[in-house]
Amino acid sequence: MRVGLAREALNYDCRQRHDLRAVCVAGNVKPALTKRTKALFLPAFGFTVNRNLAPVSFQCCPSFAMGSREAPFRLHNRAKSSIESVGRGRHAPSDMRFQTSVQGKCMEEQWTVLKVLQWTKEYFKGRGFEQPRADAEVLLAHALGMERVQLYLNYDKPLSPEELARFRGFVRRRAAYEPPQYITGKKEFWSLDFEVTPAVLIPRPETEVLVEKALEIAGNKPSLVLDLGAGSGAIAVALAHERSGIRVIAVDKSWPAIEVARKNAMRNGVAERISFVVMDLFEAFGTGALFDLIVSNPPYVSDAEFLDLAPEIANYEPLSALRGGGKQGLALIGKILQRFHHHLKPEGSFLMEIGLGQAEILEEGFLSDLAGRYEFIEDYSGVKRVLHVRGKGV
């Protein structure tokens, strides 16, 4: 039966016979069909049922997330093979409304902010995401062009067809394990807004420990800072934003990353005090002692750890910003430790973020020449997260 004919026939029954009764509760449609009417047409899902079949029991879930190409419900009866999917053609409404008839009166139920959040939370939970509710809120707020807190004030707001379509696209991407930060294109760090793209590592909260220590060291005195492996510019921008006396040279070997960092400096009003350079580590600096402070959040994931990373990280974030090289992930860190003292003033300081368990390895094989001049700073989880080395004159 054609979609249009099925809809027309069902609407006729709703108006004339009053013999189709359905109940739509919390996303579950349970039809109760009389002997005279043995059919149900669900335009929200784009399915038709032969009117001559025995009653069918449906278990429905909202189709806004994955679209009608992935069957949104399961069928339970001997007539399952007679049901035809007609896809989401021109007759299927795009606003994902449930359309049912209760005691002969045609009714509609729209997707509200609360209902969309509830369904998406459960869907993401089923996918194994660690923060399903937070992910749902971030993506829905982005789709609606509002802040997350505004969602709580608009629980009863119905979503328009355009908003649902936009949100559906975000859910598809997240279901493929794309990080929410790349979907929205932004991430908060140090209470500042940063643009993030797949060209840069997503800033992590533990890196704020490094920023805190750097600000403590710099105080209010003028300081020239080198940021090695700047990425999104999170460290450089946070330092310049907090201290007007700080000037930063931000270095990264990735041109796309430097472009993102430059935009973030402009976004946060500190572009005039940060210079961006595309190069690998210290290669253009010669051997002069230039900097009051050197900071770095280098790649430090080992080869073995990389195999166990969540797909959100391993499949989307830039490998060059993740893998530190070698069995222990310390190949690049070793190069930095060999050379940083050539570019640090005697009274200066060097700060570098490291990974879980790497502090002990560094103490055993990399820091013997720095005895008495270094310390490890723990993050909020008690992990030794930042290596601090004082200059020779301190």
Image: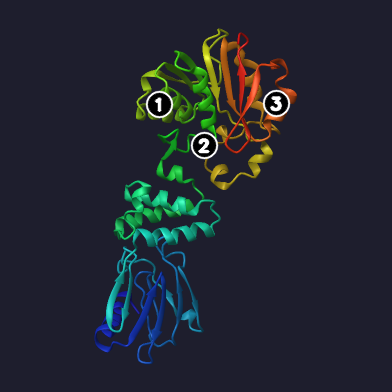
Colouring rule applied to residues: rainbow
Residue corresponding to mark 3: 362
Identify the amino acid type marked 2. Answer: Pro
Residue 218, position as x, y percentages in the image: 49, 17
Q: Residues within 10 Å of mark 3 (few under 14, many from 20)?
A: some
The residue depicted at 31 percent of the width and 81 percent of the height is 102
Q: What is the count of numbered marks?
A: 3
Comes first in the chain, label 2 or label 3: 2
**Distance between the Cα atoms at labels 2 and 3?**
23 Å
**Does residue 318 lie above or below 121 as drawn?**
above
| Residue 37 at x, y percent in the picture | 35, 88
SS at badge 3: helix
Q: CA distance from mark 1 to mark 3?
A: 33 Å
Q: Earlier in the sequence, mark 1 or mark 3?
A: 1
x and y percentages locating residue 59 in the rendered image: 46, 74
Residue at numbered disc 2: 205
Residue at which label 1 appears: 262
Q: Which mark is residue 180?
A: none
In the image, residue 74 above or below residue 161: below
Q: Is residue 135 above or below residue 191?
A: below
Residue at 35%, 69% (x, y): give it: 44
Q: Nearer the viewer, mark 2 or mark 3?
A: 2
Residue 297, given in percent of the width and then of the height, sits at: 56, 28
SS under mark 1: helix
* Tag 2 secondary structure: loop
